[in-house]
Image: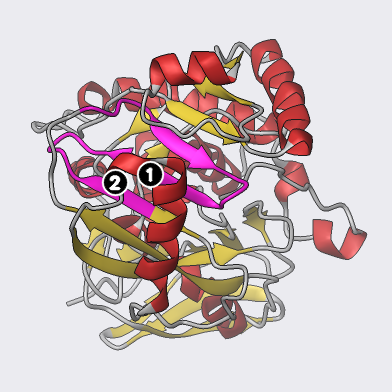
Protein backbone atom coordinates (compact mmCIF):
# COMPACT_ATOMS: atom_id res chain seq x y z
CA UNK A 1 0.00 0.00 0.00
CA UNK A 2 1.12 3.52 -0.75
CA UNK A 3 1.78 5.86 2.19
CA UNK A 4 -1.32 7.97 2.89
CA UNK A 5 0.70 10.88 4.32
CA UNK A 6 4.05 12.45 3.55
CA UNK A 7 5.95 15.59 4.42
CA UNK A 8 7.08 15.90 0.80
CA UNK A 9 5.79 14.19 -2.35
CA UNK A 10 8.05 14.20 -5.40
CA UNK A 11 6.46 13.55 -8.79
CA UNK A 12 8.93 12.09 -11.28
CA UNK A 13 11.55 9.35 -10.96
CA UNK A 14 14.30 10.82 -13.12
CA UNK A 15 17.66 12.12 -11.96
CA UNK A 16 16.33 15.39 -10.50
CA UNK A 17 13.54 13.76 -8.54
CA UNK A 18 15.79 11.03 -7.14
CA UNK A 19 18.67 13.38 -6.32
CA UNK A 20 16.37 15.85 -4.58
CA UNK A 21 14.77 13.05 -2.57
CA UNK A 22 18.24 11.94 -1.46
CA UNK A 23 19.30 15.47 -0.53
CA UNK A 24 16.11 16.12 1.42
CA UNK A 25 16.62 12.93 3.40
CA UNK A 26 20.30 13.66 3.96
CA UNK A 27 19.36 17.10 5.32
CA UNK A 28 17.08 15.49 7.88
CA UNK A 29 13.64 15.52 6.22
CA UNK A 30 11.64 12.40 7.03
CA UNK A 31 8.56 10.89 5.42
CA UNK A 32 9.42 11.56 1.77
CA UNK A 33 7.50 9.84 -1.01
CA UNK A 34 8.54 9.74 -4.67
CA UNK A 35 6.08 8.53 -7.30
CA UNK A 36 6.94 7.57 -10.87
CA UNK A 37 4.38 6.57 -13.50
CA UNK A 38 6.73 3.98 -15.05
CA UNK A 39 10.17 2.75 -13.96
CA UNK A 40 13.10 4.73 -12.63
CA UNK A 41 14.81 6.82 -15.35
CA UNK A 42 12.14 5.84 -17.88
CA UNK A 43 11.76 9.43 -19.12
CA UNK A 44 14.31 11.99 -20.24
CA UNK A 45 17.06 10.73 -17.92
CA UNK A 46 17.19 7.30 -19.52
CA UNK A 47 16.95 8.73 -23.03
CA UNK A 48 19.49 11.55 -22.79
CA UNK A 49 22.98 11.80 -24.24
CA UNK A 50 24.29 11.96 -20.64
CA UNK A 51 26.98 14.49 -21.43
CA UNK A 52 28.35 16.59 -18.56
CA UNK A 53 29.95 19.93 -19.42
CA UNK A 54 30.93 23.19 -17.78
CA UNK A 55 31.19 25.23 -20.98
CA UNK A 56 28.24 27.59 -20.77
CA UNK A 57 27.62 31.23 -21.58
CA UNK A 58 25.83 32.33 -18.39
CA UNK A 59 27.36 32.55 -14.94
CA UNK A 60 24.63 30.55 -13.24
CA UNK A 61 24.90 27.59 -15.62
CA UNK A 62 28.69 27.63 -15.31
CA UNK A 63 28.51 27.46 -11.51
CA UNK A 64 25.77 24.82 -11.42
CA UNK A 65 27.73 22.62 -13.83
CA UNK A 66 31.11 23.26 -12.20
CA UNK A 67 29.84 22.17 -8.80
CA UNK A 68 28.00 19.20 -10.30
CA UNK A 69 31.18 17.99 -12.01
CA UNK A 70 32.94 18.06 -8.64
CA UNK A 71 30.12 15.96 -7.23
CA UNK A 72 30.12 13.52 -10.16
CA UNK A 73 33.84 12.94 -9.59
CA UNK A 74 33.09 11.52 -6.12
CA UNK A 75 29.53 10.32 -6.54
CA UNK A 76 30.16 6.60 -6.04
CA UNK A 77 31.86 7.26 -2.70
CA UNK A 78 29.33 9.92 -1.63
CA UNK A 79 26.36 7.67 -2.35
CA UNK A 80 28.13 4.45 -1.28
CA UNK A 81 27.37 2.93 -4.67
CA UNK A 82 28.87 -0.49 -5.36
CA UNK A 83 29.12 -0.07 -9.15
CA UNK A 84 30.81 2.25 -11.61
CA UNK A 85 28.71 5.24 -12.76
CA UNK A 86 31.09 5.36 -15.75
CA UNK A 87 31.98 9.02 -15.41
CA UNK A 88 34.67 9.47 -18.04
CA UNK A 89 36.28 12.91 -18.28
CA UNK A 90 37.56 13.02 -21.85
CA UNK A 91 36.43 16.56 -22.51
CA UNK A 92 33.97 18.47 -24.66
CA UNK A 93 35.22 19.94 -27.94
CA UNK A 94 33.10 22.81 -29.27
CA UNK A 95 33.52 23.71 -32.94
CA UNK A 96 32.81 27.13 -34.47
CA UNK A 97 32.08 27.11 -38.19
CA UNK A 98 30.78 30.67 -37.91
CA UNK A 99 32.73 33.81 -37.07
CA UNK A 100 30.02 35.21 -34.80
CA UNK A 101 29.89 31.93 -32.91
CA UNK A 102 33.64 31.99 -32.39
CA UNK A 103 33.39 35.50 -30.96
CA UNK A 104 30.76 34.19 -28.52
CA UNK A 105 33.11 31.34 -27.60
CA UNK A 106 35.77 33.90 -26.67
CA UNK A 107 33.33 35.56 -24.27
CA UNK A 108 32.28 32.17 -22.90
CA UNK A 109 35.86 31.09 -22.18
CA UNK A 110 36.65 34.34 -20.38
CA UNK A 111 33.57 33.87 -18.18
CA UNK A 112 34.40 30.22 -17.56
CA UNK A 113 38.03 30.96 -16.67
CA UNK A 114 36.93 33.72 -14.30
CA UNK A 115 34.84 31.03 -12.56
CA UNK A 116 37.78 28.59 -12.35
CA UNK A 117 36.61 26.38 -15.20
CA UNK A 118 39.71 25.31 -17.17
CA UNK A 119 38.38 25.74 -20.70
CA UNK A 120 40.52 27.20 -23.48
CA UNK A 121 40.26 28.53 -27.00
CA UNK A 122 41.63 26.45 -29.84
CA UNK A 123 42.83 27.24 -33.34
CA UNK A 124 41.85 24.93 -36.21
CA UNK A 125 45.35 23.47 -36.10
CA UNK A 126 45.08 22.72 -32.39
CA UNK A 127 41.70 21.10 -32.99
CA UNK A 128 43.31 18.89 -35.65
CA UNK A 129 45.88 17.77 -33.09
CA UNK A 130 43.16 16.81 -30.60
CA UNK A 131 40.69 15.34 -33.11
CA UNK A 132 42.59 14.49 -36.34
CA UNK A 133 39.46 13.40 -38.18
CA UNK A 134 37.54 16.69 -37.82
CA UNK A 135 36.98 18.57 -41.07
CA UNK A 136 38.56 22.00 -40.49
CA UNK A 137 37.43 23.54 -43.78
CA UNK A 138 35.60 26.74 -42.86
CA UNK A 139 36.43 26.23 -39.17
CA UNK A 140 37.25 29.40 -37.23
CA UNK A 141 38.30 27.61 -34.07
CA UNK A 142 36.81 26.06 -30.99
CA UNK A 143 37.03 25.45 -27.27
CA UNK A 144 37.74 22.51 -25.01
CA UNK A 145 37.51 21.67 -21.33
CA UNK A 146 39.20 18.39 -20.47
CA UNK A 147 37.24 18.06 -17.21
CA UNK A 148 33.94 17.67 -19.10
CA UNK A 149 32.70 14.20 -19.86
CA UNK A 150 29.95 11.61 -19.82
CA UNK A 151 28.31 9.27 -17.31
CA UNK A 152 25.90 6.35 -17.41
CA UNK A 153 22.44 7.81 -16.60
CA UNK A 154 21.05 4.48 -15.43
CA UNK A 155 23.86 3.89 -12.95
CA UNK A 156 23.69 7.48 -11.70
CA UNK A 157 19.93 7.14 -11.17
CA UNK A 158 20.33 3.80 -9.45
CA UNK A 159 23.00 5.22 -7.16
CA UNK A 160 20.68 8.01 -6.04
CA UNK A 161 17.73 5.60 -5.71
CA UNK A 162 19.61 3.23 -3.44
CA UNK A 163 21.04 6.04 -1.32
CA UNK A 164 17.63 7.69 -0.95
CA UNK A 165 15.92 4.45 0.06
CA UNK A 166 18.63 3.73 2.64
CA UNK A 167 17.74 7.10 4.19
CA UNK A 168 14.06 6.16 4.36
CA UNK A 169 12.61 7.61 1.15
CA UNK A 170 9.63 5.62 -0.13
CA UNK A 171 9.74 5.19 -3.92
CA UNK A 172 6.67 3.96 -5.77
CA UNK A 173 7.09 3.06 -9.43
CA UNK A 174 4.20 2.39 -11.84
CA UNK A 175 2.18 4.87 -9.84
CA UNK A 176 0.33 7.54 -11.78
CA UNK A 177 -0.62 10.93 -10.40
CA UNK A 178 -4.20 11.86 -11.24
CA UNK A 179 -4.58 15.17 -9.45
CA UNK A 180 -3.13 17.56 -6.89
CA UNK A 181 -5.51 18.87 -4.25
CA UNK A 182 -5.31 22.46 -3.04
CA UNK A 183 -7.28 24.56 -0.57
CA UNK A 184 -7.11 28.36 -0.39
CA UNK A 185 -4.03 28.43 -2.59
CA UNK A 186 -2.10 25.76 -0.69
CA UNK A 187 -1.24 22.14 -1.49
CA UNK A 188 -3.10 19.58 0.60
CA UNK A 189 -2.66 16.27 -1.18
CA UNK A 190 -1.76 14.18 -4.21
CA UNK A 191 -4.25 11.77 -5.78
CA UNK A 192 -2.69 8.69 -7.41
CA UNK A 193 -4.08 5.56 -8.95
CA UNK A 194 -3.08 3.77 -5.75
CA UNK A 195 -4.68 6.21 -3.33
CA UNK A 196 -4.37 9.68 -1.86
CA UNK A 197 -1.27 11.05 -0.15
CA UNK A 198 -1.96 13.94 2.21
CA UNK A 199 0.90 16.43 2.09
CA UNK A 200 1.68 20.12 2.28
CA UNK A 201 4.64 20.04 -0.11
CA UNK A 202 4.88 18.71 -3.66
CA UNK A 203 7.88 18.87 -5.99
CA UNK A 204 7.23 18.66 -9.72
CA UNK A 205 10.16 16.92 -11.44
CA UNK A 206 8.07 15.44 -14.23
CA UNK A 207 10.24 16.67 -17.10
CA UNK A 208 8.32 16.71 -20.37
CA UNK A 209 5.11 16.18 -18.39
CA UNK A 210 5.78 19.05 -15.99
CA UNK A 211 3.18 21.28 -17.63
CA UNK A 212 0.49 18.62 -17.07
CA UNK A 213 1.47 18.27 -13.42
CA UNK A 214 1.45 22.04 -12.99
CA UNK A 215 -2.07 22.26 -14.34
CA UNK A 216 -3.19 19.73 -11.72
CA UNK A 217 -2.19 22.31 -9.10
CA UNK A 218 -3.78 25.18 -11.02
CA UNK A 219 -0.46 26.50 -12.35
CA UNK A 220 0.25 27.20 -16.03
CA UNK A 221 3.99 26.59 -16.24
CA UNK A 222 5.71 28.11 -19.30
CA UNK A 223 7.24 24.72 -20.09
CA UNK A 224 6.57 22.69 -23.19
CA UNK A 225 7.68 19.19 -24.25
CA UNK A 226 9.77 18.86 -27.39
CA UNK A 227 10.98 15.63 -28.97
CA UNK A 228 14.72 15.20 -29.37
CA UNK A 229 16.15 12.17 -31.11
CA UNK A 230 19.40 10.27 -30.80
CA UNK A 231 21.05 7.29 -32.40
CA UNK A 232 23.95 4.95 -31.72
CA UNK A 233 26.34 3.20 -34.10
CA UNK A 234 28.10 -0.11 -34.21
CA UNK A 235 31.21 -0.18 -31.98
CA UNK A 236 34.58 0.74 -33.45
CA UNK A 237 38.04 0.61 -31.92
CA UNK A 238 38.42 3.75 -29.78
CA UNK A 239 39.89 6.66 -31.72
CA UNK A 240 37.91 9.73 -30.62
CA UNK A 241 38.39 11.19 -27.15
CA UNK A 242 36.27 14.27 -26.42
CA UNK A 243 32.60 14.81 -27.11
CA UNK A 244 32.28 16.90 -30.28
CA UNK A 245 29.63 19.61 -30.40
CA UNK A 246 28.82 21.89 -33.33
CA UNK A 247 26.29 24.58 -32.45
CA UNK A 248 26.41 25.69 -36.10
CA UNK A 249 25.21 22.26 -37.26
CA UNK A 250 23.28 21.72 -34.01
CA UNK A 251 24.59 18.26 -33.12
CA UNK A 252 26.63 16.43 -30.52
CA UNK A 253 28.64 13.25 -31.03
CA UNK A 254 30.80 11.09 -28.82
CA UNK A 255 32.44 7.71 -28.77
CA UNK A 256 31.28 5.94 -25.62
CA UNK A 257 33.55 3.56 -23.64
CA UNK A 258 32.55 0.38 -25.48
CA UNK A 259 33.27 1.95 -28.90
CA UNK A 260 29.88 3.00 -30.26
CA UNK A 261 29.22 6.56 -31.38
CA UNK A 262 26.28 8.29 -29.71
CA UNK A 263 24.85 11.14 -31.77
CA UNK A 264 21.94 13.55 -31.51
CA UNK A 265 20.60 16.91 -32.59
CA UNK A 266 17.63 19.21 -32.13
CA UNK A 267 15.26 19.91 -35.00
CA UNK A 268 14.19 23.59 -34.98
CA UNK A 269 10.97 22.56 -36.74
CA UNK A 270 10.00 20.09 -34.01
CA UNK A 271 6.53 21.01 -32.66
CA UNK A 272 5.42 20.95 -29.05
CA UNK A 273 4.22 17.42 -28.33
CA UNK A 274 4.64 14.36 -26.15
CA UNK A 275 5.67 12.31 -29.18
CA UNK A 276 8.64 10.03 -28.47
CA UNK A 277 8.38 7.93 -31.63
CA UNK A 278 11.42 7.79 -33.89
CA UNK A 279 11.27 9.47 -37.28
CA UNK A 280 12.65 8.43 -40.66
CA UNK A 281 14.12 11.84 -41.48
CA UNK A 282 16.23 12.07 -38.32
CA UNK A 283 18.99 9.53 -39.11
CA UNK A 284 19.20 10.76 -42.71
CA UNK A 285 19.52 14.40 -41.74
CA UNK A 286 21.93 13.81 -38.86
CA UNK A 287 24.11 11.41 -40.86
CA UNK A 288 24.72 14.08 -43.48
CA UNK A 289 25.69 16.62 -40.81
CA UNK A 290 28.01 14.22 -39.00
CA UNK A 291 29.70 13.03 -42.20
CA UNK A 292 30.41 16.61 -43.28
CA UNK A 293 32.20 17.37 -40.00
CA UNK A 294 33.62 13.94 -39.20
CA UNK A 295 34.17 12.07 -42.51
CA UNK A 296 35.38 8.73 -41.00
CA UNK A 297 31.81 8.02 -39.88
CA UNK A 298 30.21 8.32 -43.31
CA UNK A 299 30.05 4.53 -43.76
CA UNK A 300 29.38 3.49 -40.17
CA UNK A 301 26.34 1.31 -39.45
CA UNK A 302 23.60 2.68 -37.19
CA UNK A 303 22.36 0.10 -34.68
CA UNK A 304 19.32 1.87 -33.28
CA UNK A 305 17.66 5.22 -32.70
CA UNK A 306 15.28 6.56 -30.07
CA UNK A 307 13.61 9.74 -28.90
CA UNK A 308 12.97 11.51 -25.63
CA UNK A 309 11.50 14.76 -24.41
CA UNK A 310 13.23 18.01 -23.57
CA UNK A 311 11.22 20.05 -21.07
CA UNK A 312 11.74 23.42 -22.74
CA UNK A 313 11.35 26.83 -21.14
CA UNK A 314 11.23 30.20 -22.96
CA UNK A 315 14.84 31.01 -22.05
CA UNK A 316 16.21 27.43 -22.02
CA UNK A 317 16.73 27.72 -18.24
CA UNK A 318 15.07 25.64 -15.52
CA UNK A 319 12.25 26.84 -13.29
CA UNK A 320 13.31 26.23 -9.68
CA UNK A 321 11.44 26.83 -6.47
CA UNK A 322 7.98 27.50 -5.12
CA UNK A 323 5.22 28.76 -7.40
CA UNK A 324 2.18 30.93 -6.61
CA UNK A 325 0.52 27.88 -5.02
CA UNK A 326 2.02 27.52 -1.56
CA UNK A 327 3.83 24.24 -1.14
CA UNK A 328 3.99 23.49 -4.88
CA UNK A 329 7.60 23.48 -6.04
CA UNK A 330 9.02 23.01 -9.51
CA UNK A 331 12.32 21.64 -10.73
CA UNK A 332 11.77 21.42 -14.48
CA UNK A 333 12.27 23.28 -17.75
CA UNK A 334 15.90 22.18 -18.01
CA UNK A 335 15.82 22.29 -21.82
CA UNK A 336 18.20 19.38 -22.25
CA UNK A 337 20.80 20.00 -19.52
CA UNK A 338 19.00 18.64 -16.47
CA UNK A 339 21.16 15.53 -16.12
CA UNK A 340 24.49 17.31 -16.07
CA UNK A 341 23.57 19.83 -13.37
CA UNK A 342 21.36 17.55 -11.27
CA UNK A 343 23.79 16.80 -8.43
CA UNK A 344 24.19 20.41 -7.35
CA UNK A 345 20.82 21.78 -8.47
CA UNK A 346 18.97 19.11 -6.50
CA UNK A 347 20.84 20.12 -3.36
CA UNK A 348 19.77 23.75 -3.79
CA UNK A 349 16.15 22.77 -4.51
CA UNK A 350 16.13 20.61 -1.37
CA UNK A 351 17.28 23.61 0.64
CA UNK A 352 14.43 25.69 -0.81
CA UNK A 353 11.86 23.03 0.07
CA UNK A 354 13.19 22.93 3.63
CA UNK A 355 12.82 26.72 3.69
CA UNK A 356 16.55 27.21 4.12
CA UNK A 357 18.68 29.83 2.40
CA UNK A 358 20.29 28.04 -0.58
CA UNK A 359 24.07 28.16 -0.55
CA UNK A 360 23.87 29.59 -4.08
CA UNK A 361 21.27 32.21 -4.91
CA UNK A 362 18.94 30.76 -7.56
CA UNK A 363 16.09 33.22 -7.06
CA UNK A 364 16.57 34.49 -10.63
CA UNK A 365 15.44 31.05 -11.85
CA UNK A 366 12.07 31.21 -10.12
CA UNK A 367 8.62 30.95 -11.64
CA UNK A 368 7.97 34.70 -11.59
CA UNK A 369 10.79 35.75 -13.91
CA UNK A 370 8.69 35.32 -17.03
CA UNK A 371 5.99 37.66 -15.75
CA UNK A 372 8.71 40.19 -14.95
CA UNK A 373 10.27 39.74 -18.39
CA UNK A 374 13.61 38.83 -16.80
CA UNK A 375 14.61 35.96 -19.05
CA UNK A 376 18.13 34.55 -18.75
CA UNK A 377 19.16 33.64 -22.29
CA UNK A 378 21.77 30.91 -22.62
CA UNK A 379 23.79 31.09 -25.89
CA UNK A 380 25.18 27.54 -25.70
CA UNK A 381 22.19 25.17 -25.84
CA UNK A 382 22.26 22.13 -28.15
- Horizontally, residue 151 falls left or right of residue 52, namely left
Q: Badge 2 local density, few (<14 within 10 Å), some, or many (20+)? A: some
Under tag 2, what secondary structure? helix
Q: Badge 1 local density, few (<14 within 10 Å), some, or many (20+)? A: many
Q: Position of residue 168 (x, y in %)?
A: 23, 48
- Name which residue lies at 20% across and 32% down: 86
Give the answer, above or below, for where 322 lies relative to 155.
Answer: below
Q: Quadrant of the N terminus?
A: bottom left
**The residue stretch that appears in magenta:** 239-263
- Name which residue lies at 41% across and 50% down: 290
Image-quadrant location for residue 229: bottom left
User: Is residue 46 magenta-colored?
Assistant: no
Give the answer, above or below, for where 6 lies relative to 378.
Answer: below
Circle 2/circle 1 CB separation < 8 Å? yes
Image-quadrant location for residue 340: top left
Under tag 1, what secondary structure? strand
**Residue 8 visible in the shown view:** no
Give the answer, above or below, for where 81 lies relative to 12.
Answer: above
Determine the residue located farthest toward the left in the rendered image.
82
Q: Position of residue 206 (x, y in %)?
A: 45, 68
Which residue position holds label 1?
253
Determine the residue located farthest toward the right in the rendered image.
372
Q: Position of residue 242 (x, y in %)?
A: 37, 27
- Horizontally, residue 335 falls left or right of residue 134, namely right
Q: Which mark is residue 297?
A: 2
- Horizontally, residue 183 falls left or right of residue 84, namely right
Separation (CA) of disc 2 from disc 1: 11 Å
Give the mark, 2 or 1, whose residue is nearer the N terminus.
Answer: 1
- Horizontally, residue 370 falls left or right of residue 272, namely right
Amino acid sequence: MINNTANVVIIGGGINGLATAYNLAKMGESDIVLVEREYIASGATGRCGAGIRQQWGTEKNCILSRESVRMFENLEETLDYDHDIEFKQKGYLFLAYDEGLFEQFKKNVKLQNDLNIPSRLLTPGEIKDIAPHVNINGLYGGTICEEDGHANPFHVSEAYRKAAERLGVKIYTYTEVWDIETERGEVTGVITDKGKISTKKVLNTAGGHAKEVGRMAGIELPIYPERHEAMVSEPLDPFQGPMIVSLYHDFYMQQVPHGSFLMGHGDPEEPESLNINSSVKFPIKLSKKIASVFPPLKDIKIIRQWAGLYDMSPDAQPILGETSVKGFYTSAGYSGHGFMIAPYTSKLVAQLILEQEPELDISMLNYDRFERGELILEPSVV
